[in-house]
Every structure is written in structure tokens, then in C-alpha cells.
Image: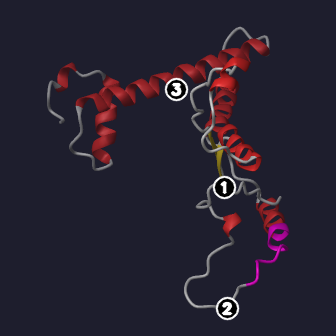
């Protein structure tokens, strides 16, 4: 990619190209240089803005080296958090390792964790309402006298069919709760 209009390229773009070349990158798209420049310019503006805020907080009229160091350090601490100290990690590991592992059940095949500890078990519940039959018109006393029922249902059958019609169908799965 190098060599295309080398004399018209700004100094910063030449530096980016030389850095890419020194890292062994020979083939890249031209917009990669512009993206690197955009990131670097944004970083410099952020650091200088922070340094200006720190200088103003210290009631100084100009930005000095200490303001820049503080701005860069705060940017590094914010962008790249440090891992906890070794002592904290050892204490955490010791407390976690005090809890014994569950006993293995001797058997053939691969031993798997209990069902409640897997991500494969369903953990939701569905309620599927049954479609209700069309609403029947209310019967009047006159209709009762004229209509004869050829096969009367028992009260138990009527209650059961009414219950099935009103109750939505439930499909449920265990909602496992992890112990703390």
C-alpha cells in the first residue's frame, strides 16, 4: 500500500504507515490509516481536556507536565483496570475451596452435574388458554318447556366438562433456584 502519493501524505499518516510496516503488516486498506489517526486524535484530545480540567482545579493558568501525567494515568486506570492483589485472590480462593465438591456416584459413562445445576433444564412456565366455546344464549323458561334433552348428562359429567372448559391448559417446567 505504501508508495501511493507518498509526498501528499501528512506526517502523522506517514508515522502510522511506518508503524504498520515495522510490525510486519504489508497489505492493508487505506482507511486503516485514517482509523488509527482518528483514534489517536481522540485520545490526545481526551487527555488534553482532562489535563485542562486538572489545571483549572489547581487554579493554574496553564497546563504543565504534572497535569498531563495525571490525565494519562487516570485514562490508563479507567481504560485498563488492574487485577486485584495476589493476597486478595489467595484469600478468595481459600474461602471458595473450603466448600467440598459433591460426591461422585460410581457408574458407567460420563458423570454429569445434578439437573438443577445445568443450563439445559427448562426454567420457564407456559399458560396456554383453551379456546372457549362460542357463548351460548341464555335459555328462558319458555325454551325449557319446548326442548327435550335426549341424553341428559349427570351432574358430575357437567361439572367436569365445565371445569375443563374454564381452566386454561398449563404446561409447566421446574423453576430451579440456585443455592447461594
Q: Residue 152: x percent and y percent?
A: 67, 43
Residue 10 part of the magenta-drawn span? no
* Vertical relation: 43 (above or below) 109: above
First reached walking from the N terminus: tag 1 or tag 2: 2
Residue mark closest to the camera, 2 vs 3: 2
Residue 99 part of the magenta-drawn span? yes
Span of residues in magenta: 94-103
46 left or right of 2 in image: right
6 left or right of 151 in image: left
Q: Is residue 14 visible?
A: no
Residue 143: which quarter of the image? top right
Q: Residue furthest left?
A: 4
Residue 117: which quarter of the image? bottom right
Residue at 67% across / 68% down in the picture? 115
Q: Are marks 1 and 2 in contact (CB under 8 Å)?
A: no
Q: How is the image coloured?
A: secondary structure
Tag of residue 173: 1
Q: Secondary structure at mark 1?
A: loop
61 left or right of 8 in image: right
Q: Residue 155: x percent and y percent?
A: 76, 46
Q: Are marks 3 and 1 in contact (CB under 8 Å)?
A: no
Disc 3 target residue: 43
Residue at 64% across / 64% down in the picture? 118
- Location of the N terminus by quadrant is top left
Disc 2 target residue: 106
First reached walking from the N terminus: tag 2 or tag 3: 3
User: How many residues crowd around disc 2 within 10 Å: few (fewer than 14), some, or many (20 or more)?
Assistant: few
Cα separation, mark 1 vs mark 2, equals 29 Å
Observer-nearest of 26 and 93: 93
First reached walking from the N terminus: tag 3 or tag 1: 3
Amino acid at each position: 500500500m505504501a508508495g501511493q502519493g507518498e509526498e501528499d501524505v501528512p506526517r502523522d499518516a506517514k508515522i502510522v504507515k511506518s508503524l504498520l510496516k515495522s510490525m510486519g503488516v504489508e497489505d492493508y486498506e487505506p482507511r486503516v490509516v485514517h482509523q488509527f489517526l482518528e483514534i489517536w486524535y481522540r485520545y490526545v484530545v481526551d487527555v488534553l481536556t482532562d489535563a485542562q480540567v486538572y489545571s483549572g482545579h489547581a487554579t493554574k493558568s496553564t497546563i504543565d507536565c504534572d497535569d498531563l501525567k495525571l490525565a494519562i494515568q487516570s485514562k490508563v486506570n479507567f481504560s485498563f483496570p488492574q487485577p486485584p492483589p495476589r493476597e486478595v485472590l489467595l484469600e478468595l480462593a481459600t474461602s471458595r475451596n473450603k466448600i467440598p465438591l459433591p460426591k461422585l456416584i460410581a457408574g458407567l459413562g460420563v458423570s454429569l452435574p445434578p439437573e438443577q445445576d445445568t443450563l439445559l433444564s427448562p426454567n420457564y412456565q407456559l399458560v396456554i388458554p383453551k379456546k372457549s366455546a362460542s357463548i351460548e344464549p341464555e335459555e328462558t323458561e319458555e325454551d325449557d318447556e319446548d326442548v327435550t334433552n335426549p341424553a341428559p348428562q349427570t351432574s358430575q359429567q357437567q361439572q367436569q366438562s365445565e371445569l375443563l372448559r374454564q381452566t386454561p391448559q398449563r404446561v409447566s417446567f421446574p423453576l430451579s433456584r440456585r443455592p447461594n
